[in-house]
Amino acid sequence: MSAKFTSRSVLQAFKRHVSARANTARQESTDAAGLQGLQVSKLPNGVTVASLDSTTSPVARVVLVANVGPRFEESDQLGITHCLRVSVDQANKSKTAFELTRHLTQIGANLSCTATRENLMYSLDCLKDNLDIGVSCLVSAATQQAFKPWEIQDCQQRIAFEAAVVEQQPEARLTEMLHQVAYRDTLGRSLYAPSHMFGKYSSEMLMEYVNKNFTAERMAVIGLGIGHKQLTRYLKTMSVPGSGSNTAKAAKYSGGEVRHEIGGDTAYAAIVTEGLGSQNKDAVALSVLQCVMGCGPTIKWSNGSAASKIIQAAGQATDQPFATSCINTTYSDSGLFGFYAVAQASQMGQVLKAVLSEFGSVTKNGVADQDVQKAKMQVKACAAMMSENGSNVIQNIAQQLLSEGTVQSQEEFFRLVDSVSKQDVVNVAKKVINGKPSMAAIGNLSTTPHLDELM
Amino acid sequence: MAVAAKKVAVTVWKMTLAKWAYNKSYFPSLGMMRDDCLYETDVVQEAIKRLPNNVYDARQFRMSRAISLSGCKDTLPKDEWTKLEEDELYLQPYIAEVERERDIKREWNKQ
């Protein structure tokens, strides 16, 4: 569980606004690692296209990303992103659902749709020889949705099923509750549809949402393992469903507390304050701070107290099983920074108090040099290991292109991490940790203190 | 999904003949349309499943009114009969789509 938080949070920290550059500039990086040869340009219809060719792998990946996550939902459209995501395999204007599936299986490709709170990513993995069919399937599924009424009705069952699966996972519910209490609307909107909306999504509603939000400046297509000319040729006939500009509502952090008692043996809680957006110049220092506090065991099956300060602190407060990790979630204009803890129901109070005092001591007493050094190495190692995987690389490029308009290479990122000093970490700690807290708790909350009892 | 009336250039006498033949058919006197009377094959049944709710409800109303009239061996008054100009082939687009999907499936499964 903690490993998941590490990788997601450090990946978020990859996004950094380095300097303002023209979006249409053809960018060729000569760095040794990462993005050598990344080319970015704009199609005639206004969509940004980026490609990174590679000759080593026979697999090509293409991702069409749209800045259309749950944060853009209005209060009468809750869960519409969930419905959009689930309807990716339905009939569109150029292919029936059967044709789409058959084309993809014929070329051995994978087409999937992933939603983050800010973006919707349609990803295609296929062999380089089959890209013409693959990209046409991808573009038709992502931009030419037909939303046939009878197929949308079939989707609702899938939505209900996914929501029921999430209901069974306290950790997933905890994340949704945490965001809801921290942001209320925009970033507080859940990734999953609420039960009162099952069966209520109509074809007109979805079509209207797509036409309003899928605009050219909020969409980008990224190809990995495919040449730039080739990719732009495949995208020549792409049409953008939306028009007009739609400025995103700024995410406003409110803070607060929410608890949900469901019984059982364990309690799950997360306490955060407002972190930094990916464009903030201190975002990298915040990632270093996250690794200073501890992101879970670095050696499999160990208890992690050597690697993580908060695990060490919580381990001294209880001798029963627990898990705790520092959270650093970064969005384009805001973030959450804090920790997450799971413990036996009777031990939760002690665990939370111990971890909180560890955070408090960082603001009062600062951090040790060697902790900062260790954390910097961990951040760099984590980023490097994530970039081993093609799908991580392409998702990272996609999110950076949409939120910043430029893509930062690994070497630039490493330079930024190296330039973080101990004072930077302490300053960002003081700025972030002393903010207004939000708390979410679920499970058996018999001994879990309330936020005012903890602070 | 309203069907645009197919405007075919026909001579006047053809139109008169068409109207006479239409009115001689039993179903307009019961207030039904041509698509209400289609024999329900698999294709037609699937197409009916895809009708929007209001069109489906109107179809059901016409059919139940016709059944009750025919049970009394009665018809509607002459001015309430369905007229050829008002008769809408509402089901044909859905039938065409279902047939097209089946053709595509058949083509793929041939290989």
Image (cartoon, rainbow, N blue to C red):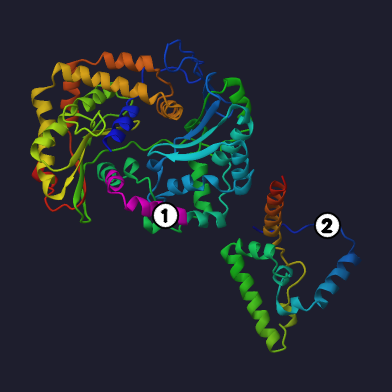
**Share a chain, discs 2 and 1?**
no
A170 part of magenta stretch: yes
Tell me the residue at 77%/69% (across/down): B84
Q: Position of residue A250 (x, y in %)?
A: 33, 36
Residue closest to the far bottom = B72
Residue B10 x %, y %:
87, 60
Answer yes or no: is residue A127 visible.
yes
Q: Secondary structure at mark 2?
A: loop
Residue A295, above or below B75: above
Instruction: State the residue position of label 2.
Output: B8
Q: Chain of mark 1?
A: A
- Left or right: where A61 falls relative to A234: left
Q: Indicate whether A35 appears above or below A201.
A: above
Please name the residue that numbered disc 1 is placed on: A161
Residue type at the position of mark 2: Val
Residue located at (19% from left, 31% from top): A304
Secondary structure of residue under mark 1:
helix
Comparing A1 with A199, the one in front is A1
Question: Residue A399, relative to residue A187: is it above or below?
Answer: above
